[in-house]
Amino acid sequence: MSTPILALGRSTFGNPDNNGRLLTNDEALALLYDWVPNERLRLHMKQVGAVMKAWALEREGADELTARLLHDADWEKYPESHCRVIIEKLEALNVDAEVIHCIASHGPKYFGVEPGSTMDKMIYVFDELSGFIHAAALIRPTRYEGMDVKGILKKLKTPSFAAQVSRDDINDAISRIDTPLEEIIQFVIDHQKEVQ
């Protein structure tokens, strides 16, 4: 297997002594708005963050980890160093090592970091699906209202729709969890529709 283009070259991130240290929501949003001028990318990150938060609270009984909404914070300004720059920034801010690893693992074939924890796997699952579902909402007159799983599944089988979204990544991510794709799609629809 060849080395991923954006490979981070490591699988350990942050300092374990920083366990539980998180950015506040205000700190994370300030970093988001400072680093990400593109409104569509900010919306994508907020949507993934909202779905991750909902999953953590509803399915894992975990606390909200706001830094996870920063998974693509360096993508626009530093595309050749995507993930590396935001990871280094969060390490400098002494953010929880598990949160940094979660961000590092949101694209294993690109960054060379395998998702380990449930939340690592879920950010990988939600990243591509969130954007895909939002693209589907944008072409509907009622947006998310009345959107159903069957329609999303049909669009996933249409290569020309949202062609930049990797179906391979979606399938790989889903294969790593014990929740059916249909249930994940419904969860995303339910939890990102109000995000602005």
Image (cartoon, grey):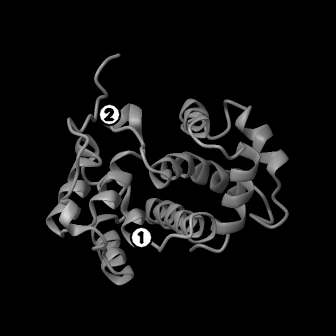
Where residue 46 sits: x, y (%)? 49, 67
Residue 168, above or below 44? above
**On the rendered structure, is 149 left or right of 36?**
right
Identify the mark at residue 112; answer none if there is no mark.
2
Where residue 156 sits: x, y (%)? 71, 37
Where residue 166 sits: x, y (%)? 55, 34
The residue shown at (49%, 61%) is 40
**On the rendered structure, is 8 left or right of 36?**
left
Residue 169, above or below 27? above
Dividing the picture into quarters, in which one does residue 145 lie?
bottom right
Q: Label 2, secondary structure: give it.
A: loop
The amino acid type of the residue labelled 1 equals Leu
The residue shown at (21%, 53%) is 85
Residue designated by label 1: 65
**Front-most of 62 and 191?**
62
Sort mark 1 into few (<14), some (14-19) or many (20+) by Cα contacts within 10 Å.
Answer: many
**On the rendered structure, is 27 left or right of 182?**
left
